[in-house]
Image (spheres, grey):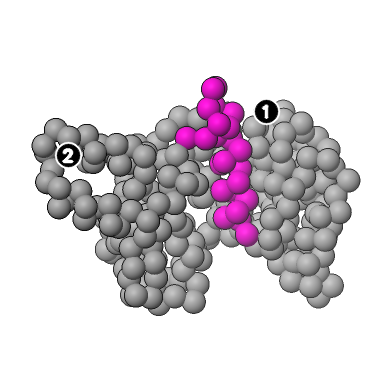
Amino acid sequence: MDESTLEKLLEDFRAGRVERDQVMGRLRQLPFEDLGFAKVDHHRSIRCGFPEVIYCESKTVEQVLAIAEARLRGGGNLLATRASEPMIEALVKRFADAQFCAAARTVTVRQNHPRQYPGTIAVVAAGTSDLPVAEEARVTAEIMDQTVETFYDVGVAGIHRLLAHSDALQSANVLVVVAGMEGALASVVGGLVDKPVIAVPTSVGYGASFQGLAALLAMLNSCASGVSVVNIDNGFSGGYNAALINRMAAPGKRREPEQVDDSK
């Protein structure tokens, strides 16, 4: 539930279109819905601007389906990350509007009409091996109604590939830079643009990369001033934070919580 849904519920009660017991039933589930194994947060969109996201790893298929059903009943768009193939198959079968990205291991269900926000988010990936993380960032930003432009396989080993896109990179409002190995790409991009750069280290690399630790430390120690860093392989956080930042670029708006579309 979000602010517009709550307002409509109260207006319907005042107009006599719904009964008191119906209103009380909806309000009882406002903070969260207890499924026994999970407490689904129906209040998160009001607090944070986007509904609760389902992190699928370590859950069963049945648990993911039950959480998804509860989440969609509460309104708003759905994002499920780190879904296994059986989870993806089950979600796509259960929800007719479900879309999946195999590379990112994500499933989305859009219940709301997209909003229009100014500008673009650039998702920049060093190599093809980084695409699962980069695609997770892209899917996350897009389900949050952002326009995303991707620049893939533009790592520093062939820096001319990156520089060929300098104008487009400089025109983006926010940039998510995804890289493994030595993680140098984030610093390079940070030195080319005057916009926030969110660096996402990946676990791609040989032994001394230490499953992404080398890239993480390199990004944390970047001398480019506009670079901030999220956790290893966390494309979701990169895309989510980029979307929150770009929402603030909307004229006269600090943050717009996602609204439920009641036209369906």
Q: Circles 1 and 2: CB distance less than 8 Å?
A: no
Q: State whether residue 51 is above or below residue 170.
A: below
Upstream in the sequence, badge 1 or badge 2? Answer: 2
**Magenta residues (range):** 234-256
Q: State whether residue 163 is above or below residue 62.
A: above
The residue positioned 30% from the left and 41% from the top of the image is 5
Classify residue 160 by image quadrant.
Answer: top right
Callout 1 secondary element:
helix
Q: Is residue 225 magenta?
A: no
The residue positioned 72% from the left and 30% from the top of the image is 170
Locate residue 214, reporting x and y percent: 82, 65
Locate residue 110, reporting x and y percent: 35, 47
Q: Which mark is residue 78?
A: none
User: Which of 164/220 is in front?
Assistant: 220
Locate residue 141, reporting x and y percent: 53, 45
Calculate the distance from the C-alpha at mark 1 to the C-alpha at mark 2.
47 Å
The residue positioned 21% from the left and 55% from the top of the image is 25
Q: Is residue 247 magenta?
A: yes
User: With 247 as the anchor, is 193 left or right in this view?
Assistant: right
Residue beneath disc 1: 171
**Structural crowding at the residue carrying mark 2, measured as other residues with C-alpha within 10 Å and reported as few (<14), some (14–19) or many (≥20):** some
Residue beneath disc 2: 13
- The quadrant of the picture occupied by the C terminus is top left
Classify residue 59 by image quadrant.
Answer: bottom left
**Structural crowding at the residue carrying mark 1, measured as other residues with C-alpha within 10 Å and reported as few (<14), some (14–19) or many (≥20):** some
User: With 42 as the anchor, is 118 left or right in this view?
Assistant: right
User: With 213 as the anchor, is 67 left or right in this view?
Assistant: left
Q: Amino acid at mark 1?
A: Ser
The residue positioned 79% from the left and 61% from the top of the image is 215
